[in-house]
Every structure is written in structure tokens, then in C-alpha cells.
Image (spheres, helix red, strand yellow):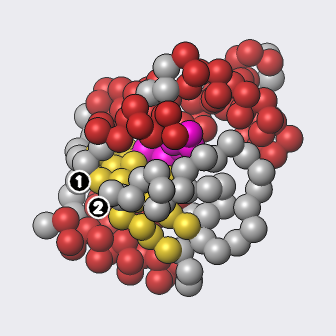
Amino acid sequence: MKILIIGRARHGKTTTATALRKQLTKKDFKVGNYATSQFLIHRLSEVLHVPLKQIEDNKNEYRPRLIELGNLLCDLDPGILASICLFTSKKANDDVAIVDGVRRKNEYDRVKEYFDLILYVERKIDTIKDNFELDHVKDIASTIYLENDGTQEDLENKISQIIENLK
């Protein structure tokens, strides 16, 4: 199974992916969690000749360069970042691949058929300026909308319900 998690920065994509992985692992699935940003951070560290940790620890400082690199790659092939994640998952022989980081409409349109389940995570907070282009109503209405409007336990309960509904 392949799961795509979409949402703005700081809306809970990583928390959702972690909770999904934890719950599915308890059901004896081998689960891999892959963020497109990890590849971008890796690639940018090579381009700039700086340690990976330097970019990870100062992500906001490097955000404009990461956005520029992501846009460049997605302009060449909108499916490249998700495909790298899925390739890595296949090599790891995962039962379930969780991918997050699709941000552009052309990217989503290219990769949506790769995934069995798509979650759109949204939290009602001020967002940071980045290149996120998707709207859960206009662009990706066929996804499961996951409002991150409570505690982490509330989010985990919503995720449990989604997993139960998949059966």
C-alpha cells in the first residue's frame, strides 16, 4: 500500500506519518516513511558542499534554496520526488510506503495515481510562506481530509478510524 500525505508546513504531516507508521507497525506491517524534503536536503548539501546536518538544523534559513531546487526538479519531471521516495521504499521491501511533501499542483496531478490512499492534513494556524499550491477542495477533493484541530491523541484517534475504514 502507498499512502501520500499532503499539507502545508507545520500542519502535522510528519506527526500524521509517524502515527500511521506506529499504528500500522503494530499490525505487523513493514512501514517506511519518506519525505520528499529529505532528498532535497541531501541534494542541496551536495550542491553547496555543506554537511547534511547543517541544512537540517537550519531548515528555515535554507528554505528558499530548497524551494528553488524542488521547483527546478518538478519543472523537469513533476513526479521525480515522489518516485524517488517510492523507489527507496521498494528497495526497502516495505509493505506500506508513506510519502509526504508533494506541494505543487502539477506534481500532485502526475503522482496521484501512484497512491492507494491520499490524506490532506490541515491545521487552522498561520502558515509560513512557501510554494504549497494545493487546496483540498479545488485540487484534490478525492482525498481524505484530516483536520488536525486537537491534541496529538485526537489526531491519532482520527488516524485509527481511517485505518479501520480501510478494512
Q: Which of the marked residues, 1 or 2, is nearer the chain's N terminus? A: 2
Q: CA distance from mark 1 to mark 2?
A: 6 Å
Q: Is residue 59 above or below residue 151?
A: above
Q: Position of residue 128 (x, y in %)?
A: 77, 56
Magenta stretch, overall SS: loop
Amino acid marked by disc 2: Leu
* Quadrant hosting residue 23: bottom left
**Residue that carries the numbered disc 2 in the rendered image:** 24
Secondary structure found at label 1 = loop
Q: Is residue 63 above or below residue 46?
A: below
* Quadrant hosting residue 14: bottom right
Amino acid marked by disc 1: Phe
For the magenta stretch, what is the residue range? 99-104
Determine the residue positioned at 34% across, 50% down: 3
For the residue carrying disc 2, how many other residues have a C-alpha within 10 Å: few (<14), some (14-19), or many (20+)? some
**Residue that carries the numbered disc 1 in the rendered image:** 29
